[in-house]
Image: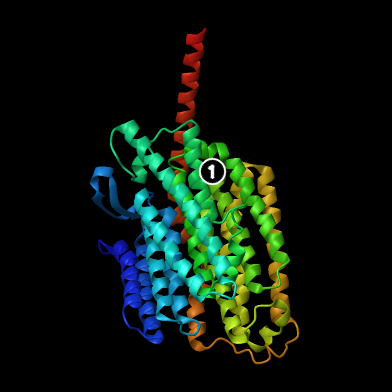
Amino acid sequence: MFEYALSVMIFLPILAGLALLLMPFSKGGARVAGFIVSVVVLFLGIELFIGFSGAGPMEYVESRPWIESLGISYSLGVDGISLLVLMAGSILFPMVFSLFAPRSKGYYGNLLIAQGAMVGAICATDLVLFYIFWEIMLLPIFFMIGLYGGPNRLPATLKITLYTIAGSLLMLAGIVYVGVSYHSQFGEWTFDIVQLSRLNLGGGFAILAFLMFMIAFAIKIPLFPFHTWLPDAYTEAPSSTTFVLSAIMAKIGVYGVIRFVVPVFEVEFARFAILFSLAGVTGMMYCGLAAIAQKDMKRLLAFSSASHMGIIALGVFCMNVQALTGSLFQIAAHATSTGVLFLFIGLMEERMQTRNIADLGGIAYRAPIFATFFAIAMLASVGLPGTSGFIGEFLIILGAIKFNAFIGFLAGTSLIIGVCYMLWMFQRVFFEKSNDRTEDFKDLNVTEALTFLPVILLILAMGIFPQPFIKKIEPTAQLQIAQVTASTQSQLADKTVLSSDHNTQKN
């Protein structure tokens, strides 16, 4: 792969998106241009995945000084933590441009800008650079919901805006604290995550900064109880925007915790791990029960997505190799399965002008290919063996039991809730008696079938042959856990020695 592949994957979509916004394009022309750009990013992502060795450290590194006086650099790289998130984003975005009726050029322009900014956030190894891309990727989402969403889009946009601005301000304060602390300890400025991992933080300010970062990322995941913006935003957003929020943006929240919080705040992370693990399990249970009560398919899937993000977050907080590997694997598995389900629901709404479960039925008899693809994605979402969803959830539950048997038990039993509401929804929508709305429902055409087929095959491949994916991420997970464990033990030992010396002097 050539030297600047990551930069191309970032700035090609951003520049193309700006061109669509500023230049006169028709709907069809903007759609074709967006599809071509996303396919270029896809091929680069596939080449990157194939060439990734998985040895542990960063690969495809690009680094050059940017604001030298503050130690801020333009630094990019990919390791096992970011690999599958980047792969999921590369594979899924072309689907958005090839499905649904053409929208305005502004919509496609914002979509491309969001894609480029997301790739930048995933690949950034400088904390300030990450923050910049983090902020950029939120702007087009606001426009796509506020301008192109459903009838209640304005309250939903306001809610997600207030949540994300609050989280971003907290993160910015945390970044300033980390940078000042590094300068105080080492006499130089840097925001490079490898260098920041050398920090020895402690005390009330360290706990406060840790919580600032965690709240910002918990909002984006979203982690209970910071999830309340999600049902409205996911429901009112266009289906392709909901797809982006669920499949990619929520995963970047989990990625941010692993990449930037764990290496810097090891002691604080270990201290509060049990609390955040309980938050993850509580979110699984609460959102799962809330999904059962939904009559709107999209809103049901929104709560389902929040529930599954709870188990992904749980794997991070368990602080062992099995759970972390499971979370990294499940990020891609959930992105492909739940993301595709949102696209399917978007197609159903476009064709029948409804998402109400009670208004649907008998689709399997009218559209067997559509029903088969939907069933595979749905079964992967609930973790059926042989699909991608099983491997990640199994590893997370295994790691959760190792971390805390009670939490592992709650997480395992909570998964049953997801099986119940998903199978109930599938039976109602696809196998009950047809009605006037579903009588003329058309199956996937050739273009739509070919669009979904690669992702459906990927879902099955990740479930049947998971090892090629696991071997690329497990070494980085092992390295991360080893570094955190060693650093935590060292800092706790230092505190013990200081306390012992203090007691000796006192006596």
- Report whether 7 appears left or right of 428: left
Q: What residue do we see at 42% from left, 72% from top?
A: 111
Q: What residue do we see at 42% from left, 48% from top?
A: 172
Q: Position of residue 433 (x, y in %)?
A: 75, 85
Camera-nearest residue between 250 and 88: 250
- Quarter of the figure with residue 22: bottom left
- Quarter of the figure with residue 139: bottom left
Q: Position of residue 221 (x, y in %)?
A: 54, 56
Q: What residue do we see at 72% from left, 60% from top?
A: 289
Q: Position of residue 57 (x, y in %)?
A: 36, 49
The residue beneath circle 1 is: 319
Check disc 1 and give the amino acid type: Met
Q: How many marks?
A: 1
- Quarter of the figure with residue 37: bottom left
Q: What residue do we see at 36% from left, 40% from top?
A: 179
| Figure check: 269 above or below 151 | above
* Residue density around tag 1, few if under 14, some if 14–19, many if 20 or more, within 10 Å: many
Camera-nearest residue between 238 and 39: 238
Q: Position of residue 294 (x, y in %)?
A: 70, 69
In this orientation, does residue 383 appear? Answer: no
| Figure check: 48 above or below 355 | above
Helix or strand or loop: what does disc 1 sit on? loop
